[in-house]
């Protein structure tokens, strides 16, 4: 077996001064998003009451979505000959998921590469599967937003439907072209990084299966969000289709703002605008739902990763620190 060198991520995002500036900008954006909404939020908070059974159901749904996304990554990895046991994939994926809290959102790819390489899997294949999985996830998210809520979101942001349709069509064409485009790109990547790459290539069947799993994940996220809203703001409408569209669109907004850790501030602002714009909630309820759902999802994102990190051998934790 050929030993592969870990792929180390080096980026301007990781400079301490840049991190500080970006975090300050994020704080300013959060303050701006909440400006003028404090009175409405305080009024809505007087009737705030948590129903934990709905929160529990929502949390279980999100964890199930994680399971689907992990299997999608394993499937893409397997297409390149990288066999990884599901328990190992869970540990690696949940640790790498912590990377979304680092400005730039690129550390997670490096973490996947480092940890997978220590399981005997090509670091290039692991990183390639992670990047490809992210692109498929974003493209599928646009498609889901269009299918479930283009008409409603069009009233909030004119042109959303056209833009999302164009993005979805481009995504579909891209998936069809990937079997031809990926081999030379990955060969260049492996040569540049000095890592080995198997001769296997992803099939169109594997790619479309990954697309289907990512679409199911977005639907699951939206349903979990609907359950969560029932638990904290029962006055908000509970149309599952609308919640899938609103959650997906706001999540994509937060994810695409690269300098904000976890899309902090931007996802909540988008969520509030969309909920109020489509008439699903008043301003106060929408802000409360945005803030509480952020706390809820942050716990579900960070806690599994921290638990997996604690179970990781000290030598592998040190390797991850060096990969930053």
Image (cartoon, helix red, strand yellow):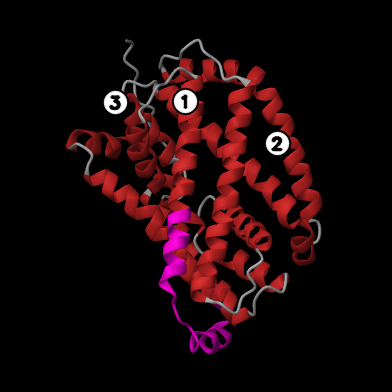
Q: Which residue is the extreme one toward the left?
A: 314
Name the magenta segment's main secondary structure: helix
Give the secondary structure at mark 1. helix
Tell which tag, 2 or 1, sits nearer the viewer: 1
Where residue 324 appears, as percent x and y from the top left, is: 35, 39
Where residue 33 appears, as percent x and y from the top left, is: 57, 72
Q: Mark 1 and mark 3 in contact? Answer it, CB < 8 Å.
A: no
First along the sequence among labels 2 and 1: 1
The vertical placement of 116 against 306, above or below, is above
- Residue lying at 43% horizontally and 51% vertically, measured from the top left: 63
Please indicate whether residue 32 sits to the left or right of residue 122 in the image: right
- Seen from the viewer's position, the closer of residues 33 and 113 is 113
- Residue lying at 69% horizontally and 52% vertically, measured from the top left: 145
Give the secondary structure at mark 3. loop
The residue to which callout 1 is attached is 77
How far apart are labels 2 and 1 at the CA level?
20 Å
The vertical placement of 246 against 236, above or below, is above
- Seen from the viewer's position, the closer of residues 32 and 128 is 128
Visible in this render: residue 256?
no
How far apart are labels 1 and 3 at the CA level?
15 Å
Where residue 295 appears, as percent x and y from the top left, is: 42, 66
Is 52 inside the magenta-drawn segment?
Answer: yes
Highlighted magenta segment, given as a residue range: 34-61
Circle on res. 171: 2
Is 101 inside the magenta-drawn segment?
Answer: no
- Residue lying at 33% horizontally and 24% vertically, measured from the top left: 117
First along the sequence among labels 2 and 3: 3
Please indicate whether residue 274 sits to the left or right of residue 158 in the image: left
- Seen from the viewer's position, the closer of residues 299 and 27 is 299
Circle on res. 118: 3
Circle on res. 17: none
Where residue 322 appears, as percent x and y from the top left, is: 28, 36
């Amino acid at each position: 077996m050929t030993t592969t060198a870990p792929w180390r991520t080096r980026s301007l995002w990781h400079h301490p001064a840049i991190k500080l500036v970006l975090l300050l900008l994020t704080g300013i954006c959060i303050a701006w998003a909440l400006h003028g909404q404090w009175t409405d939020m305080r009024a809505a908070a007087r009737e705030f009451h948590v129903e934990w059974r709905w929160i529990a159901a929502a949390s279980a749904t999100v964890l199930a979505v994680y399971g689907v996304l992990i299997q999608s990554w394993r499937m893409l990895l397997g297409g390149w000959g990288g066999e990884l046991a599901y328990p190992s994939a869970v540990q690696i994926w949940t640790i790498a998921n912590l990377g979304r809290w680092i400005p730039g959102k690129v550390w997670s790819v490096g973490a996947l590469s480092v940890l997978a390489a220590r399981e005997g899997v090509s670091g290039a294949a692991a990183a390639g599967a992670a990047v490809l999985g992210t692109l498929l996830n974003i493209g599928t998210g646009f498609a889901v937003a269009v299918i479930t809520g283009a008409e409603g979101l069009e009233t909030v942001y004119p042109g959303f439907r056209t833009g999302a349709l164009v993005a979805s069509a481009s995504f579909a064409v891209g998936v069809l072209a990937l079997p031809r485009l990926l081999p030379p790109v990955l060969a260049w990547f492996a040569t540049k990084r000095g890592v080995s790459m198997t001769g296997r290539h992803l099939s169109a069947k594997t790619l479309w299966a990954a697309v289907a799993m990512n679409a199911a994940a977005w639907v699951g996220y939206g349903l979990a969000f609907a359950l969560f809203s029932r638990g904290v703001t029962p006055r908000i409408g509970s149309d599952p289709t609308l919640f899938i569209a609103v959650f997906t669109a706001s999540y994509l907004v937060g994810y695409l703002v690269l300098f904000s850790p976890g899309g902090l501030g931007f996802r909540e602002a988008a969520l509030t605008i969309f909920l109020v714009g489509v008439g699903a909630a008043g301003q106060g309820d929408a802000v409360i739902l945005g803030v509480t759902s952020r706390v809820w999802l942050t716990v579900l994102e960070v806690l599994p990763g921290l638990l997996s990190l604690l179970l990781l051998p000290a030598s592998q934790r040190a390797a991850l620190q060096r990969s930053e």
